[in-house]
Amino acid sequence: MELQNKKPSLTELTEVLKKMPQAEVIMTHSFGGGVYVRERFAPADTLIVGKRHRHETMSILVKGVLGVYNELGEVTVKHEAPKTWVTPAGSKRMTYSFTDTILITVHPTEETDLEKIETEFIISEKEYIECQNNKLIAIGV
């Protein structure tokens, strides 16, 4: 893929980043009260492209400074802990840890099997495009 002549999508960028040295990102998982809570520790200078979620996600930055970028690679916001926000359903984001960061995401579910949670909450790029195409057809565009 030639990156010099065009701005890559986050999906394309993900494929390039997978080939680079990977940072040690520590994930912990907690369950209770009808929610799944994922805590992510990322060291400073870490770039992470997230997966596309089917539903809104509550995000809580409890430590550090985190830049959040949209699908066009444009910074949308720079958060400094403590900070809570909602990530809309269907969005794909990239984050950059300016400092060591701890980010918590909260998902409503009774499920405790991580593979089943992934299936329940993550939408593939192909499925997302198909959903977008169906919406366009449904409204006659």
Image (cartoon, grey):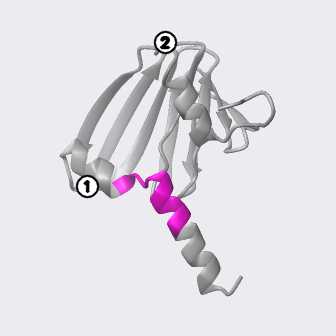
On the rendered image, what quadrant is the C terminus found in?
A: bottom right
Can you see residue 55?
no
Q: Which residue is mark 2?
A: 21
Question: How many neighbours does mark 1 have within 10 angstroms: few (below 14), some (14-19), or many (20 or more)?
Answer: few
Q: Is residue 84 left or right of residue 40?
A: right
Q: Is residue 124 magenta?
A: yes
Q: Residue furthest front?
A: 1
On the rendered image, what quadrant is the N terminus found in?
A: top right
Task: Report which quarter residue 54 is drawn in.
Answer: bottom left
Q: Is residue 77 magenta?
A: no
User: What residue sits 43% from the left and 41% below the top?
Assistant: 105
Relative depth, front residue between 10 and 88: 10
Q: Secondary structure at mark 2?
A: loop
Q: Residue furthest right?
A: 5
Which three-letter amino acid code belongs to the residue tagged 2? Pro
**Position of 28 relative to 98 (above/below):** below
User: What residue sits 44% from the left and 35% below the top?
Assistant: 104
Q: Is residue 13 left or right of residue 29?
A: right
Task: Report which quarter residue 72 is drawn in.
Answer: top right
Q: Which residue is mark 1?
A: 34
Q: CA distance from mark 1 to mark 2?
A: 36 Å
Q: Secondary structure at mark 1?
A: loop
**Position of 133 relative to 137 (above/below):** above
The prevailing secondary structure element of the residues shown in magenta is helix
**Residue 56's spot in the image, x, y percent?**
50, 57
The boundaries of the magenta stretch are 121-130
The disc at residue 105 is: none
Q: Count the labels in the image.
A: 2
Q: Is residue 30 left or right of residue 137?
A: left
- Circles 1 and 2: CB distance less than 8 Å? no
Tag 2 or tag 1, which sits nearer the N-term? 2
